[in-house]
Image: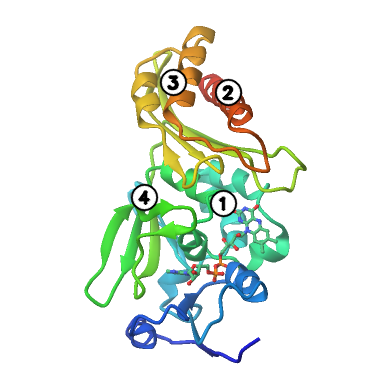
Amino acid sequence: MRPFDLVEPATLEEAFHLLEGDDPAVRPIGGGTALMLMMKEQVFRPVRLVSLRHLAPQFGAISIDADHRMIRFGATTSFSELEHSAVVARHLPVVVRTMRTLANVRVRNVATLGGNLAHADPHLDLPPVWIALGAQIVIENPAGPRIVPAEDIFEGYYETNLRHDDIIREIRVPLNASQRASYVKITTRSAHDWPALGIAVRLEMKDGLAHHPRIVLSAATNKPTRLVRTEALAHGQPITPASLRELGEAAVSEADIASDSRGSADYKKHLLRVHLGRALHALALEE
Ligand SMILES: Cc1cc2nc3c(=O)[nH]c(=O)nc-3n(C[C@H](O)[C@H](O)[C@H](O)COP(=O)(O)OP(=O)(O)OC[C@H]3O[C@@H](n4cnc5c(N)ncnc54)[C@H](O)[C@@H]3O)c2cc1C
């Protein structure tokens, strides 16, 4: 391995300074779990890695607003911190449940929320959950910060529209006491394999009807993708066997699903029909 610098700035300004220029071999590093694999495979040869670990405390904090309308997750929060947070368990149990099928404890102890988003592997578990929950991403840049919906940062397979000197600072998730949410990870080879399909769903139920659903498909598509036409069809519908069949067909015709080593496109479409129906049905029955 070629020698490289690992630098640990204490301020955002210092971090920007260290990322200056457009050399792709100079990058931020969160937990390093993705970067280390890329370095071992020699698909990434760094010149300088700019660690975000020592940035201001809010980069690593989980906090809830005083009016309980939003939870903020600092980008260097580790998966384990998320998994064991009482605030998250109480207000966003879907996030804690997602952690149970995610990697292993060694990875969860170091991988960070910012690195997970920026890596943009479509098989990752949290991005579809953030999108379903309506998360906003706070991105710092020397030209000024911006806030974008989580779905807007993904461009394609391992591709984002983040700029070289962008640093993800925070994930903001709006809270809604009447929402229900779930994430299903469907693996076809072994329980610990990467998913063939991930489905994240959130909705509210009012008088037996689904309201404001958000349905996000991952792993089977080249980026986590909201199925907006299916969401529109589900809004205001009762969850019945007939509506679930209709929604399953709508999802399958809307999603751009490709074949790969985890299954043919037809097989994954069948998985989508079945598991989306089950997820919506389970949410409708929740108390
Ligand atoms: C064996 C193994 C199994 C895994 N299984 C799963 C799984 O089942 N489900 C799952 O979801 N994940 C899984 N992961 C984790 C996932 O693949 C990524 O490795 C992880 O999410 C990346 O987080 P990180 O902090 O380590 O990122 P890093 O490796 O530090 O960085 C990844 C990318 O993000 C950039 N980056 C990092 N932080 C920021 C930031 N704040 N702003 C801008 N850019 C940034 C880096 O420059 C780099 O391009 C697994 C990982 C391993 C090693």
Q: Amino acid at mark 4?
A: Met
The reply to whether dot 3 and dot 4 touch (C-beta < 8 Å) is no
Proximity of marks 1 and 4: CB atoms separated by less than 8 Å: no
Residue type, numbered disc 1: Leu
Element type where label 2 sits in the image: helix
- The disc placed on residue 178 is none
Q: Does the image show residue 99? A: yes
Q: Callout 3, which amino acid?
A: Ala
Q: Position of residue 173 (x, y in %)?
A: 39, 49
Query: Disc 4 versus disc 2: distance between alpha carbons?
Result: 25 Å
Give the residue pinned by disc 3: 250
| 10 Å crowding of disc 4: few (<14), some (14-19), many (20+) | some
Q: Which mark is residue 124?
A: 1
Ligand 1 within 8 Å of the CB at mark 1: yes
Q: Residues within 10 Å of mark 2 (few under 14, many from 20)?
A: some
Determine which of the numbered discs, if any, sits on residue 70 in the image: 4
Task: Answer with the quadrant where ligand 1 appears in the image.
Answer: bottom right
Q: Left of 148 or right of it: where is 117?
A: right
Residue under the image location 33 percent in, 62 percent down: 138
Q: How dense is the environment of label 1, judged by Cα within 10 Å: few (below 14), some, or many (20 and up)? A: many
Where's the C terminus, which quadrant? top right
The residue identified by callout 2 is: 282
Tell me what residue is drawn at x 22 percent, y 72 percent: 144
